[in-house]
Amino acid sequence: MIWNRAKECMSREDMRLLQGKRLHKIVSHVYHNTPFYRAKMQQMGITPSDIVTIDDIVKLPFTTKQDLRDNYPYGLFAKPMSEIVRLHASSGTTGKPTVVGYTRRDIEIWSEMLARCFSAYGASKDDIFHVAYGYGLFTGGLGIHYGIEELGGTVIPVSSGNTAKQLQLLHDFGPTALCCTPSYALYLADAIEKSGIDKSEFKLKIGIFGAEPWTNAMRKEIERKLNIKAFDIYGLSEIMGPGVSYECSEQCGSHIVEDHFVPEIIDPITLEQLPYGDEGELVFTTVTKEGLPLIRYRTKDLTTLNEEPCKCGRTNVRMSKITGRSDDMLIIRGVNVFPSQVESVILEMEEVEPHYMLTINRINNLDVLTIEVEVSEEFFSDGITKMLELKKRISHRIQSVLGISADIKLVEPQSLERFEGKAKRVVDNRVL
């Protein structure tokens, strides 16, 4: 099923014309309403009148996550707070979140594009959706929730955690679609197996998984264990949230919602725009977003774009699965984690040295983060009580800054490897 045939099956020529008109309008919007963009464009000698067609996008400045941090919390908003009806946020390297704001129109657009996603997965108003993405500041839960209501489906807003309750509701309420991270889907599958309940007693047909990297091998395992069809959903808070792109029945790349988000691939070193088919860094320009429009936002995600029409009938450009990142950000249990966040905590503690190691493992299909912290010479010989207190203090602080728990291990002075060049602070043992 195609939810919005006019936009999802638009000819490439018509899409480019639409994108050009919307690009000119959004550039004018940020030029007059966001001092940050006006200053950038004036430095480059650009005015909105210079942006006529979609090809003119290369004249515009890039935006980075650092720009959002530097303008924390509302400096990049293009509408007054009286018109912002919702705030979401994601973690940043300093502990301060990246804040995004939505107008009522933004929420309506977000809901409609998610209805496109669910339709592409074969879902309809007759389906019941079990939403185990986190609610609150994370965009996953509420974003998916509003999209289901736009579709006309039934929402079970479970949020994350409490696996025993999740199993009860999955069994008793009879949802047909499961929405969560792929790793949690596998965790639930194992929990179902351990419970002894026969899989035939569940009514699940579709899985909608995102917020962390996952492979086709992992997809097959989820499908086998839960007896469902598993689909990828892509998004990022800064651009909108889940639903920026989505798979269809062909599962040959994810269709980008191009009438709202203009994609580019650039060389992360030279910043030059690359042709379709070349791998590089994914860049988005939001051409309809009112609250927080972003011009040429560098996602740091590495992928390729394909403009060939899909067998499903959709003509929107497709992006391949993300192959990596051009920076050091990790995605652990759906949360963005930077090694520098850990470093900021370590530097707060006088009892430890600025040497640490992050190890990520996937145990029972869930990501587990272990942080080794080197204790200073003077403190290490103190009593066990003080060591336990320090471990607890670091653990609480890490939880506060990262937004996820970690296993803290205090290690002896000089025990962690030293590096002459760039320090290697991360060991990721997950098979992604």
Image (cartoon, rainbow, N blue to C red):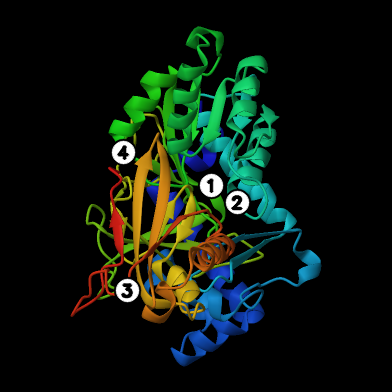
* Numbered badge on residue 424: none
Q: How many residues crowd around disc 4 within 10 Å: few (fewer than 14), some, or many (20 or more)?
A: some
Quickly name the residue at label 4: 215
Residue 127 seen anywhere in this rendered image of the structure: no
Quickly name the residue at label 1: 242
Front residue of this view, candidates 345 and 390: 390
Quickly name the residue at label 3: 413
Secondary structure category for the residue under label 1: strand
Find the distance from the CA under tag 2 to the CA under tag 4.
23 Å
Q: Amino acid at mark 4?
A: Thr
Q: Are marks 2 and 1 in contact (CB under 8 Å)?
A: yes
Residue 126 placement: quadrant: top right
Of the two numbered discs 2 and 3 in the rendering, the one whose residue sits closer to the viewer: 3
Residue 89 placement: quadrant: bottom right
Q: Amino acid at mark 1?
A: Pro
Q: How many residues crowd around disc 3 within 10 Å: few (fewer than 14), some, or many (20 or more)?
A: some
| Earlier-in-chain disc, 2 versus 1 | 2
- Residue in the picture at 43% in, 17% down: 227
| Earlier-in-chain disc, 3 versus 1 | 1
Quickly name the residue at label 2: 139
Secondary structure category for the residue under label 3: loop
Q: Are marks 4 and 1 in contact (CB under 8 Å)?
A: no
| Earlier-in-chain disc, 4 versus 1 | 4
Q: Amino acid at mark 3?
A: Pro
Find the distance from the CA under tag 2 to the CA under tag 1.
7 Å
